Image (tube, rainbow, N blue to C red):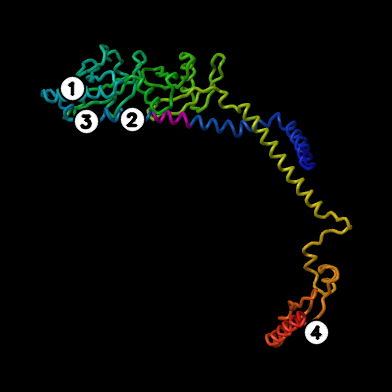
Amino acid sequence: MTIPKKTLLSFLFSVFLFSCIFLIAYPGFFNVIENRFYKPSVTAAVIRETARDAEIIDDFLSSLQKRFSSLLRENSIRRSFLAENNSADIFERSRIFGSLMETIPGLNSICFVDLNGVDIHYSVFHSDDGIEDLPFNEIYVPAHEQYKLNYHKERNELIFSFSFYDSTDYRVGIALFAISVNEIFDALAAAGKIGYNDKLIFCSSGTGSSLAGIIKAYPGISEKNITSEAVLVWAGKYQSIVSVRMTGIPLVLVTVPSEYNFWFSRIVREDMLLLPDILSIITLISIFLTIFLIVFFVFNIIQNRTEKNKPDAAGKKPMDLEELESITDKDSIEKNVLPSGSILVPLDETNDMIYEQNGVPYIKNDVLENKENTDEKLNDDFMELIDSVTDKQN
């Protein structure tokens, strides 16, 4: 198969032009694409994905907080803490809290502590371990606050603290609900945001049991090392993307704030934010094909114009439409338009409205311009035309 000359020239010229551009722009070309286009786009996508994970956690915690708050407003529960309570209210309180612990498998304990931090008014546990060992100043909720969220590292639990009032609106103490952190993992897994091989790392603040942040990590990450790095990032000025130092693995910490006053971070490999080699190859191919098509298109236009103006074997150029339109007189028509041997002969020397071409009579185009009695004369001439045709046939 023979390759057309113009195609081969277009290809060779495209290769040459592409090579020149590539050699000049290659040192900084991909850096520009990566830093100005690819990396900002991928970074924004990772931040949005991290924010969606944080939103799922916020929604889960918000649902728990609203559910616990609504139960503490139940009249039977509030009356059960009066000095003169009755057995019906106490039974209803046990039924409500028992049903709550059955519907929330990760709810490990419920406890009502007096404001002195010593006396316990009521408690129910899934295990023999209570929560009396928690420092009271950390779980204490001031009267002007609705609730507080804490993290118990040894028990791996999140603890909701609420101010509690009896039916006379007297502040009795602090209500505590301890829930396993596995419930948050299950909430993310149910939403398809985490795999069962991944893990969540919970970090408390350095000053107490307050939850400082949650880290979404993958297997092989050292919890101790990443926790120390993350705490430093959270303690400093907030940044959404920060490189962290891990042995042999370049990583970045993607962080977004939570509505519950803690940070949610995600660990990703740094090479995820860099332009992959396959995309570099695709970019080069796209640029080459674009240059080739442009060159091929330009060569075709030039060649078509050259062939159009090329003289024929007799040395004559093709007659343009404009030249044909400029021919109006009889001599020009006979010379340039009509076949050889054809002439225009008036049917009647005194009649300038009809002419004969190749033995066929025609009415001139300008018979209707600036003529008096045009209709009558046209009818007479038309009749004369019919008679002449009839005579010729006879």
Whether label 3 touches label 2, CB < 8 Å = no
Q: Is residue 290 above or below residue 101?
A: below
Secondary structure at badge 4 equals: strand
Residue 80 lies in the magenta-colored region: no
Magenta segment range? 48-56
Q: Nearer the viewer, mark 4 or mark 3?
A: 4
Residue 243: % across, % down = 54, 22
Whether label 1 touches label 4, CB < 8 Å = no
Name the N-terminal-most of marks 1 and 2.
Answer: 2
Residue 141: % across, % down = 29, 24
- Identify which residue is drawn at 77% across, 76% down: 360
Residue 348 marker:
4
Residue at the farthest right position:
314
Per the image, the residue denoted by label 3 is 73
Per the image, the residue denoted by label 2 is 62
* Residue 186 falls left or right of residue 169: right
Q: Nearer the viewer, mark 3 or mark 2?
A: 2
- For label 1, the crowd category at 10 Å Cα-Cα, with few meaning under 14, some 14 to 19 and many 20 or more, is some
